[in-house]
Image: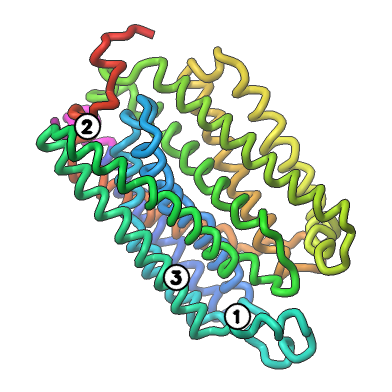
Amino acid sequence: MTPTDTIRPQLDRIQRNALVVGVVFLAVSLAGLFMNAQHFWQSYLYGYIAISALAIGSLGIFLLHNVVGGNWGVAIRRFIESGLKTLPMFALLVIPILFATHSLYRWTDATYRAENFAVGHKAVYMNVPFFIARTAFYFAVWIFLGFRILKMANEQDRTGDLALFKRIKGRSAPALLLFVVTTTYAFIDWIMSLEPDWYSTIYPWLFTVGEVLLTFAFMIALLVLFSKHEPFASFVKTAHFHDLGNLMLAFTMLWAYMGLAQFLIIWAENLPDEIPWYIRRFSGGWGYLGWFLSIFHFCVPFFLLLLRFVKKNPSRLRVLALWIIFVRMLDIFWFVVPAFRQRGLEVYWTDLAVLIGMGGIWLAYFIFNLKQRPLLVLNDPRNTYSRKGHAH
């Protein structure tokens, strides 16, 4: 099966428009590099972290689905695979950050290290050559794991070999563990080290969960968009949306649990090395954004996702998924940017320009990957809804 005429023009149009918007906005944002290089690199890091989440999250969901199984991943499997195939793009886009470490990371300043004992004590780990080497290692691991297991999955889909399917599951389990470990260290390096005198053992796990939640929301919104067209119209059942809604609920709860646990631990200990991180994010205007996220990133989605009539209605679920994408962008902004702008809530035009530019180019690449293969995987042994003929 190939993309039918009803959906092929739509994919072509989305890809073309996304590429044009992405190139234009990213080109315009480059003007910020010459106007204020410091602001540009802050915006670039934020945009990179926000959009790369979709590729990294796709790899996580791909491995998770291979391990736990379930019908929920069959309908979005091509979306997940197309997303993880964009990882090489971010391996290239991270290179400018590696050249701009002295503009972004305070621990690269010898004077700062000398004046802060805790930071200087971490110099064996926090140094530019090791930082670059670790980043290269993370992408090497992610790309190797993702593409190697994806190759096996494509072969299984072609042959229908169940023995190969069991091998995929067996290899995905340790790969998922390695994914969690590498993303943990990646977020420590890329984001938490922006404030090198602060630390939290929950922080990187919280960020990994948030990236998976963002990716689930994007995949759900895309599935609802395509569900009115073949081949999805005759394949997708109400149960698919219900299962995906439950997963979005689960990761929303897990994200909130980790965020609250981190806050309570730091609040209870009240240590001078830990509380400044929250002080910066709840003062000078940042607190309004923090409380907004507390209510509209968790409370509202949590209660709505408890309702079956929301999860089983594609239109309502799409609106909620798009909302989660929006608040996830704000949450990443709240995590990353106050490390630089500590005087108060400040938003620069380059923040939005880089985000839209990088997002547009990624979406065009994602659609390009999506068009290369059939949109549905009919030989997936986890596809029990269609085999049993359920009418939900």
User: First in sequence: mark 2 or mark 3?
Assistant: 3
Query: Dot 3: few (<14), some (14–19), or many (≥20) neighbours within 10 Å?
Result: some
- Residue 126's tag is 1
For this orientation, the residue located farthest to the left is 159
Query: Closer to the camera, 4 or 67?
Result: 67
> Which residue shows up at 63% across the image and 78% down it?
105
- On the rendered image, what quadrant is the N terminus found in? top left
Can you identify the residue that label 2 sits on?
377
Please report contact status of discs 2 and 3: CB closer than 8 Å, yes or no: no
Q: Looking at the picture, which amino acid does disc 2 mark?
A: Val
Query: Closer to the camera, 347 or 171?
Result: 171
C-alpha separation, residue under disc 2 versus residue under disc 3: 32 Å
Dominant SS in magenta: loop
> Which residue shows up at 34% across the image and 7% down it?
391
Q: Looking at the picture, which amino acid does disc 1 mark?
A: Met
> Which residue shows up at 81% across the image and 48% down it?
264
Please say whether residue 249 is visible from this viewpoint.
yes
Q: In the figure, residue 235 lies in which quadrant?
A: top left
**Element under label 1?**
loop
Please determine whether, in this image, residue 264 is positioned above or below residue 5: below
Bounds of the magenta segment: 1-10
Which colour assignment does the render follow? rainbow
**Element under label 3?**
loop
User: First in sequence: mark 2 or mark 1?
Assistant: 1
Please determine whether, in this image, residue 47 is positioned above or below residue 123: above
Q: Looking at the picture, which amino acid does disc 3 mark?
A: Val
